Image (cartoon, grey):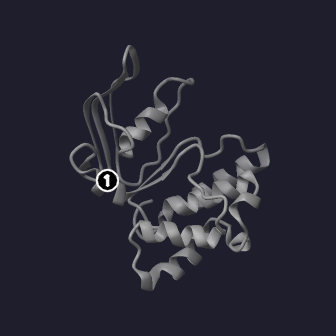
Amino acid sequence: MIKVDGLSKRYARTVAVDNISFEVQKGQIVGFLGPNGAGKTTTMRVLTCFMPATSGTASVAGFDVQEHPMEVKRRIGYLPETPPLYPDMEVREYLHFVGQLKGIPKADLARRVAEVSERCSVADVSSKLIAKLSKGYKQRVGLAQAIIHNPDVLILDEPTSGLDPKQRVETLELIKRVTTPSSCRRTC
């Protein structure tokens, strides 16, 4: 599902990612470990086509991130460290908007919004403004937007950052629940 070969990213004199190679097979769940500044987020940004590598290659779901970025973006769900939320939108409205952007057919959109709202435990706040939600609920909404189009690959960047210990446990349980094969039509 993910193949990285000799990937490097440099900023002027700073080397953020230095010649890394790895593979992630379908169904595997992996994590990047390392200190701040080790290149974890930069690697994820390259894999999600938010920035180009300086050298090396990377492919996601069989598509090269440099040559076919739109195909890669169609096949990934991405939750950056700070979820990309619109605080002045209601949860349901926001998920509907993201679903449209991700190309979910109009006939399926309301059903899909309801499904991910239930799976990510945000159905009870679906009519609330995102600005009024706790950080834990905002993370859940972020996860819902990442999986709304049923992606082949799910990339999460520090999904529990800034959460209190209880919210951290709840979020990890939620991630486990939404990424198990029985909860997905395809591998999440």
Q: Where 149 falls versus 169 (above or below)? A: below
- The spot of residue 120 in percent (x, y) is 62, 65
Name the residue tied to disc 1. 72
Q: Is residue 156 left or right of residue 172?
A: left
Name which quarter of the figure residue 54 lies in: top left
Nearest the viewer among 129 and 8 is 129
User: The C terminus is located in which quarter?
Assistant: bottom left
Q: Residues within 10 Å of mark 1 (few under 14, many from 20)?
A: many
What residue sits 39% from the left and 43% below the top? 50
Q: Farthest front residue?
A: 88
Viewer-closest of 120 and 97: 97
Q: Is residue 139 left or right of residue 59?
A: right
Residue 173 visible: no
Amino acid type, callout 1: Val
Relative to 69, residue 56 above or below: above
Where does residue 143 sit, x and y in percent of width and height?
A: 57, 58
In the rendered image, residue 121, in percent from the top left (x then y), is placed at: 68, 67
Which residue sits furthest top?
Answer: 13
